[in-house]
């Protein structure tokens, strides 16, 4: 069953970069409140905001062999997405693998397991979203697969899907929907900008969104 | 049952500001080691230290409608305190609501659920203590209540209680006790200062606090 | 059973400093992938990298009396290691105890419980690795022991063992193995440096480590 | 601050017994979906269904002294409710204390910590709802309080409140509301009985509750 | 986006019943060690062993409206599979819904949230695998979807997939693979039977599986 | 480093059987409140109470090869104790391995990971204490060690130590201390028996243990 899918489809660069600029919260809302990975996925340092095409890895617990295999499949602009086949927080990835991934143009790693050498990764500016920081070493003994559908931190990810990640967490956008989601995200941002000004000026959401009547109708009492 | 209590009592500004200056650990000790919220409540960025009067929100899981309602009840110096009616880590609050809250003079948010747009909130200097950072969007479909007694992260909070929050977490002080707790906190700080100097000079707590005899009497053996 | 062991063996300063420079991930690998404390042990601020001799504390839940006792046993270069006798996240340690520990030359604290005054500790540059940040105060009512073998966050620690801690977590090295582990760590680092250059230049781990044949033999299919 | 309140008000026996018969889920709904303790509170054996007046205990972590004090305050029909002052799973309670509590007419224990001797407790028919089963022993060194307001597993409990517990968990009913809640619970049960028959006969909730129109209006599409 | 897919494909009854008889562990192995739901999914009572076609529900947190919608889509032999759109442990399901589901021939419920009325469900013999037992009530205010692909407890489930559940947990088998997996499961069982006899007679796995040479070659030392 | 230690010392059969009869809570108290494994270690079925000599396994995550190796080292009366080298809940053990272990006279398994085939194991009467029930299969690719010191669920276990396990959890007794601990346990039981009778007759612990004076002296107030 272990296999490496070498050709995957990717979304367009403009779309991907647009989604990065929009950020996780906006993209998630724009696509109908779906696609978030679990909140346990946290960045190893604040401030990174990326998007890229998913190169997926299904790996056994405690075995990072397939990371080496996956790195060969990376193109510039890709994001590695690793899902262990059972819950694991071992440190599959450190500074050597990051050096190699960066050389291939990789933009970051999303891993539902552990990562290590985080001081080095921070200095290198290689962002990682992980469930744990854990130095626990791994072996290279058992096969997994690269570029197959995975469930990573509760979200289904297909290879080539767009991964958006920032301080709010990680969101996956289906490749075929990416352009449409970007359009909706931009529309949402434009709409939010005017709201932001009104709210900053002291107007209440209760009035801007015309909520008072509905709240009263549903029975909210002011006492 | 859904209701908004519009008039709440608040502690005096001087007392509130004094409690902020004392900080969570000291205030907690000063009032007899009570009032801490659970340790899962963490700040979204380091360095903030605030105190303010609690405007409380009891909200259904995944529904942030009542946040809009609560913002109208804010006065300058208040802190929003949101407790979901069942465990939830959805992102009830983001940069738009923060913009609105800041316009009302709100000093921060304490939420036993999730928050999003944390990069924006950090740049805005709006501090949040939460159980999760999670972009998951919420709906506006079901009523809750504002300014009712809640249990937030294991601590009972009444509207108007003083919330103290810093890098150590969050503590609640009963409004009626606030002035007394402040006095005790200041006394404690004065006492600690002299201890700090002696300890820094190399004196041992064993001697300063005269513990050796009691330890021996209880049976501690040095081998 | 409560006792304080006053004489413990320590590793040499050069060895300890060498292990600090190597860091947790390298040391852990160098000694055969053992000795890590659980990933829940996180630093209160980023960037610290220390090593030191363990002065161990076995303490009852919610009782920090033995910390005072342990501080007297500290020598310059030591690290305090506290394991509660049952799971606890109370704040056993704050700025006063840190002041005292620093006065004795202590390099840091590793505690499978809580810590408080983290803003002060950060400003003082006293690093702590803990399972929680929690202001919860403790009592001084029940004895424990100092410099006895403990299990801290899943790792067995004997007094005098070398504790290595950095942003990746905490690792313990048996005192008798410390010099040997340091030699292996240095050898490992030298080896990694050449690998790093080749990887940075675009060579693949698949080729550097000669993995392709073995992967094929085990049945990995490229599709 | 440590105190024992010796006189507490209790609800009437008929009301208490009626609430026991209704069970947790019904009582919780009848009082407006409030009052549940966290789901981590599980019975040590299946099948128990009790209600009783809360005799509350606020105890330090790992210290069960106040349980002895509380037992003296028990009257026939009471339920012990123990909340530690910080998170703890030690075994505060075992077969000897159960023997004593039974002799006082106690109906069970609700403890946001651990319990032990569960085989004996099961044979004695003394039900316990706890967050853990853990043999860890406790000390008798530090005071707490009996019959003061506590927050137990996320729910505010006042002494004399009615505790209802069964296989679904634990619910607290304010003493003053108990008779009213019982009336609503009985009404709810009567209403459910007719629904149950119709559902058993194959009618759909969609029809019984007349949901189809509202679902369509909100935009649910059948495809 | 909210929709109900009314026609789904199902596997054959014989295949489904065969998979039930094989059980979770065997089915999981037979299909290459994939398809398990997370270990937090536990049965409400021991001894149930079922298989059925998945009728999936994607539901908002704390809102069980879609369960009513889903029940209409049930055919005899189906299993309800509910995945909340964000983490939630509310009690979406109790004895009334079970009565209705049983009337439609439903074999059980798999829910990555809470369930209540577990004593009644046990007496009715309606098995549930859930992440929590929690009486927390839900609302009927927001739409979700029925018979769409979901990720439930970390496993991707399409409507019509075969759900196998027993005391070991829950496994999903892709509908198209079900017959093949059954064949492999039976083959595996036949093979295991002979192994079981040899092991029971005292032969060692080391010998039956011929492991000694490989262990020695890899460097295992007997001391 | 991978090794199998073939000769281990064991405690005497009478001592072991005596400790089993005393049970976990009593043994834990008798040896000074030490030796408990974490409360996450739960029995797969209620009612088992065993003691035996530990045959320890240090195994990689997701790899059960060493279980086969360990079974050869079992003597009648032994208990297998498996500690993974990093956190893991995979199902290392099922009915085939149990069949083999029973054939060697093994009394049970303590595993800080997962177990499967729990229905079969229950029917076979082979007790297991584990952190999870999880069908996840494992591989046989990487070496570990047998009969080396391990830390299992937070407790240090040496091969040949006595493992005591029942419904309260698991406790380890150092082999050299076993006879002494048994004597203390029996003394403790004798003492408890008289206490139990007095408590059952309605005497209070406050009086039996003469606590009233000390409570008053420490400041407990009755109000």
Image (cartoon, coloured by chain):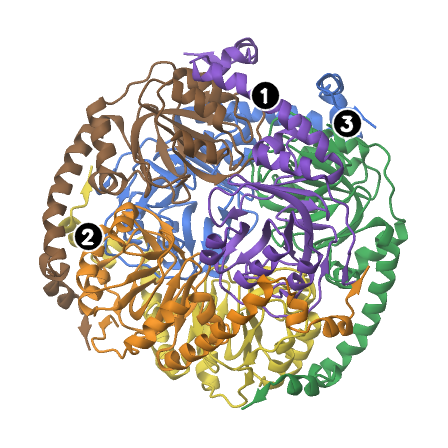
Chain colours: A blue, B green, C yellow, D purple, E brown, F orange
**SS for callout 3:** loop
Q: Residue at x 46, y 87 (%)?
A: C12
Q: Is the residue under label 2 in contact with that under label 1 (CB below 8 Å)? A: no
Residue C60 visible, this orientation = yes
Chain containing the residue with disc 2: F
Query: Which residue has dot 2 on it?
Result: F96
Residue lying at 31% horizontally and 22% vertically, measured from the top left: E77
Graded by Cα atoms within 10 Å as few (under 14), some (14 to 19) or many (20 or more), the crowding at tag 3 reads many
Q: Residues within 10 Å of mark 1 (few under 14, many from 20)?
A: few
Residue at which label 3 appears: A204
- What element does badge 1 sit on? helix
Kindly identify which chain the residue marked by label 3 belongs to.
A
Q: Quadrant of residue D92?
A: bottom right
> Residue D127: image x %, image y %?
53, 49
On whether disc 3 and disc 2 are found on a single subunit, the reply is no
Q: CA distance from mark 3 to mark 2?
A: 66 Å
Residue bearing the label numbered 1: D190
Left or right: residue F144 compared with residue C169: left
Is residue A23 visible in this depiction of the protein? no
Pinpoint residue B205: horizontal percent, then vertical percent.
70, 81
Q: Secondary structure at mark 2?
A: helix
């Amino acid at each position: 069953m272990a296999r490496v899918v070498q050709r995957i489809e990717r979304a367009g660069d403009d779309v991907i970069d647009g989604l990065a600029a929009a950020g996780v919260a906006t993209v998630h809302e724009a696509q109908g409140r779906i696609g978030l990975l679990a909140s346990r996925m946290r960045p190893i340092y604040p401030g990174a905001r990326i998007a890229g095409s998913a190169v997926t890895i299904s790996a056994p617990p405690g075995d990072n062999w397939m990371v080496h295999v996956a790195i060969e499949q990376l193109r510039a602009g890709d994001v590695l997405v690793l899902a262990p086949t059972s819950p694991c927080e071992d440190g599959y990835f450190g500074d050597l693998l990051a050096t190699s991934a960066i050389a291939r143009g990789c933009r970051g790693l999303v891993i539902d397991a552990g990562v290590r050498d985080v001081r080095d990764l921070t200095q290198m500016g290689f962002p990682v979203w992980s469930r744990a920081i854990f130095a626990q070493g791994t072996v290279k003994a058992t096969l997994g697969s690269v570029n197959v559908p995975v469930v990573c931190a509760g979200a289904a990810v297909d290879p080539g899907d767009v991964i958006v990640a920032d301080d709010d967490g990680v969101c996956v956008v289906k490749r075929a929907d990416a352009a449409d989601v970007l359009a909706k995200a931009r529309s949402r941002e434009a709409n939010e900008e005017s709201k932001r000004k009104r709210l900053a000026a002291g107007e209440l959401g209760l009035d801007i969104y015309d909520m008072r009547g509905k709240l009263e109708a549903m029975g909210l009492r002011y006492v």
